[in-house]
Every structure is written in structure tokens, then in C-alpha cells.
Image (spheres, rainbow, N blue to C red):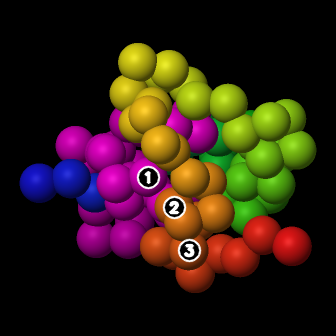
Amino acid sequence: MNYRCNVCGFKGLDRPQYFEDKYPSFDICSCCGFQSGFDDDDQGYTFDSYRNKWINEGAEWFDKNRRPKNWDLRKQLKQINITLE
Ligand SMILES: [Zn+2]
């Protein structure tokens, strides 16, 4: 079972970012590199602010080996109802 990242929309997490909407898994998203319980805690980001930073920096994959050949950022973001300008 794969879980979707709330930051970038990639459905490749082994566990949800938050259990019962409360406890972070600390898993790192292969796509945007967001780590629940760290980036949104120690680092002070929200899902939205981390996403904006990631996109502004070029939306690079954290684990480039997992990047699909025909990867489409816009389509992926649509899965979490985010539309790019
Ligand atoms: Zn992500």
C-alpha cells in the first residue's frame, strides 16, 4: 500500500506522513524530500510553504532513481488539488 505525499502528490510513501493525523512517520518523500515531523516541525515549514520552496528550486527529485520517465509535475499536483499558475 502506497501513501500519497501531501506536499507534492507523489504516491510512493510506505507509511502515511501522519498517523491518526497526529504522529509523524518521519519518512522522507522520494519526490520532494519532505520529511514529516522534521521539515514541518524543526524547520518550520507547512505543506504549502515547503511545496513552494521545492517548486521554486526546480522541483528536483530527492531520489532521482524513482523518477518516472514521463513524470508530469502538474498532473501529480492535481492529485492533491494543487494547480500551478
Ligand atoms: Zn513529496
Q: Disc 3 marks which residue?
A: 78
Could you tell me how far apart the alpha carbons at marks 3 and 2 are, in whole angstroms? 5 Å
Mark number, residue 76: 2
Q: Callout 1: 10 Å neighbours few (<14), some, many (20+)?
A: many
Question: Measuring 73% from the left and 64% from the top, which residue is drawn there?
Answer: 48
Could you tell me how far apart the alpha carbons at marks 3 and 1 are, in whole angstroms? 10 Å
Mark number, residue 10: 1
Q: Main secondary structure of the magenta part?
A: loop
Mark number, residue 25: none
Q: Does residue 39 lie above or below 63 as drawn? A: below
Could you tell me how far apart the alpha carbons at marks 1 and 2 are, in whole angstroms? 6 Å
- Say whether disc 3 or disc 1 marks the residue closer to the N-terminus: 1
Q: Callout 2: 10 Å neighbours few (<14), some, many (20+)?
A: some
Q: Amino acid at mark 2?
A: Gln
Residue 85 position by quadrant: bottom right
Observer able to see residue 35: no
Asked if marks 3 and 2 touch (Cβ < 8 Å), the reply is yes
Asked if marks 1 and 2 touch (Cβ < 8 Å), the reply is yes
Badge 3 marks a residue whose secondary structure is helix
Q: For the magenta stretch, what is the residue range?
A: 4-33
Mark 1 C-beta to ligand 1 under 8 Å? yes
- Say whether disc 1 or disc 2 marks the residue closer to the N-terminus: 1
Q: Callout 3: 10 Å neighbours few (<14), some, many (20+)?
A: few
Q: Does residue 79 lie above or below 70 as drawn? A: below
